[in-house]
Amino acid sequence: MKKLSGVFFVLLSITLYSQENTKTPLKKLTPELLWSLGRVSINGMTKDKQSVIFTVSIPDIAENKSKRKTYSIPLTGGVATEINNADELLINDRISPDGKYILSTHEVLIKKVKGNEIYSDLPKANVYIYNSLNYRHWDTWEDGKFDHVFYAPLVNSKAGEAKDIMPDEAYDCPQKPFGGNEDLIWNPDSKHILYVTKKQFGTAYATSTNTDLYEYNIETGTTQNLTAYNKGYDLAPAYNSKGDLAWLQMKRDGYEADKQDLIVAHGNSRFNLTQQRDDIHVESFRWADDNQHLFFIAPVNGTLQLFSVNDPGNNSSPIHIQQVTKGDFDISSIAGQSGNTLIVTRNDMNHASEVYTVDISNGSMKQLTHVNDEAYSNFGVCKTERRFVTTTDHKRMLVWMIYPPDFDPAKKYPTLLYCQGGPQSSLTQGYSFRWNFQLMASQGYIVVAPCRRGMPGFGTQWNEQVSKDWGGQVIKDYLSAIDAASKLPFVDNARRGCIGASFGGFSVFALEGAHAGRFKTFIAHDGVFDFRSMYSTTDEIWFENWEKGGAYWEKNNAVAQRSFSQSPSNFVNKWNTPILIIQGGRDYRVPIEQGQGAFQAAQLRGIKSRFLYLPDENHWVLSAQNALVWQREFYKWLHETL
């Protein structure tokens, strides 16, 4: 495994290829080498906008946790310096602009659900009592405690002086499970706190996506719902320095993958800046320093790119959207602006995230951090290629092809069909530390990754065609992709496999019963196997109601009945191919019985199968040692069966 000192050395000296290195045989990327790479995240720009503060996290396999170091690097590039005073260098957005108050969040016990809380004479009781849904979420059982927003005087405050702006309310801010500081912000006037929450509880919470933006007045103690008119998600609010508000919005309640637009408000006037573009689904955004434009990230043509758009509320100009960056890479975050320079993170299928600068005027980019340069100089780069496939309904589908570093078109290679999760998540030039295309290709596999039905970046209709038809056109899209790839002379048709997680895991289960001999092996991670049990046990019912079109007991609901008829569990009689099934024990999104049911079915049918159970992991694999077991078993299975 690569020593940590070797990875951090590049922070002190940017290493370029030498003649000696070019003559040295390149190493094959392994799971251990992958997990030795530095993971870069931006803390922000310094107050003077002259430097960028970033953190590098590297898993310590022996300790089974990550080690982190924080650095400062000049905006113009150069040597990165390790620092211990990042908080002093960055603007603290928890402090009100006038410097009088500070925001914080704390858990507050609102509902008694534990037996020893309800029955004080039974202090050793270990019992949970629920009267409604939302009894667990993502990877945590609900315990009656809710995260609330507090504010307190910044100086001379006394213990207990922090004020809860949501007293006695059974709602969370930040939102669970993924909300953060972006869910609670100061208005530049320092008199109002804006926060995001979904003011519904229990079963109503589990069946709705209707979050709203609430404005709390610290002088009057009153709260106003700014987005009561909208029934879907309202998220990620941000003010410019003038006090104009922008946020992300989905229109339809219960549809978590609805088109996500960028909204700005000026008083009672609201403008949807991206409604005009059917192909744009905004992932994140940031106000420009001029207060008249916004930058945002959206998927396009199998990548994530940076865009700019003007705010018509400032100058009455027509809305104009411009793509700033282009190329086979992803812009994964926007961290700040200094003059004509924007700070972003960028990655691709061969490189983990690093910090880059972008020239706003022409989109040119310069790499600012070089955390993993030395490591990557020793790995073979995998060629990625766009191919376009005609689907069974005569549509043009983008398919990413990823080739081994030493690819020779005169040879034949085992080939993996990769099935993306979501279902409505984009397949772009991302860099995963689990489903890593570079790692797969470096083991000698060609990877076929189709941007099948149900992915943003190709228009709303394309994105929505997976809903209520999981077993329909999307499965045909997968087969079209592998059939087209199989016509290439270097694809070994006798050694084709199929892999995927979440919706991709469902896709694996579905293809196990529909592949007609195409594949020699399958791997499914946290996939949906049985639609009825999924509907009865998953944490977010809004997702199931939207994706299936209703409940399985609605016999007069033709859409729901068709959806449930497509459950992979209905086609186990057609299963005949070896399958590895992976399941997280704390996955409440796709609960454990999905993996159990699939494994039991395969075993009872006498199919070579293996069950990889991770009791402490949720829908992901976060522990370093668990992740390495995952990788080793993944490639061990492929070696055995392909």
Image (cartoon, helix red, strand yellow):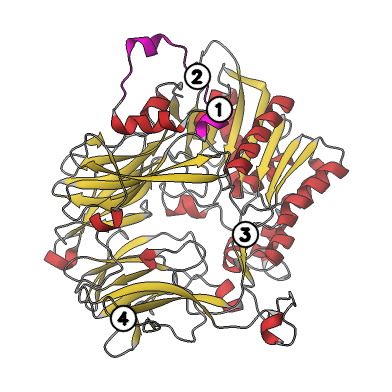
> How many residues crowd around disc 2 within 10 Å: few (fewer than 14), some, or many (20 or more)?
some
Question: Residue 390: x percent and y percent?
Answer: 51, 35
Front in this rendered view, residue 207 or 590? 590
Q: CA distance from mark 3 to mark 1?
A: 30 Å
Task: Using the image, determine if residue 394 lies above or below residue 642.
Answer: below
Q: Which residues are magenta?
A: 15-34
Q: Secondary structure at mark 4?
A: loop
The mark closer to the camera, 4 or 2, is 4
Labelled disc at residue 589:
3
Q: How far apart are labels 2 and 1 at the CA level?
A: 9 Å
Disc 1, SS = loop
The residue labelled by disc 4 is 157
The reply to whether the magenta stretch includes residue 341 is no
Horizontally, residue 225 falls left or right of residue 246, namely right
Please give the residue where the numbered disc 2 appears in the rendered image. 27
Q: Closer to the camera: disc 1 or disc 4? A: 4
Quick one: SS at disc 3?
A: loop
Of helix, strand and loop, which one carries label 2?
Answer: loop
Residue 376 lies left or right of residue 138; in this view the side is left
Please tell me whether residue 156 is drawn above or below residue 386 in the rendered image. Answer: below
Tell me which label, 3 or 1, sits earlier in the chain. Answer: 1
Residue lying at 41% horizontally and 50% vertically, measured from the top left? 459
User: Residue at the location (28% across, 48% down)?
Assistant: 53
What number is the disc on residue 30? 1
Q: What residue is drawn where x is 27% and y is 63%?
A: 92
Q: Earlier in the sequence, mark 4 or mark 3?
A: 4
Type of amino acid at the residue the image marks with label 1: Thr
- The answer to which of marks 4 and 2 sits earlier in the sequence is 2
Q: Are marks 3 and 1 in contact (CB under 8 Å)?
A: no
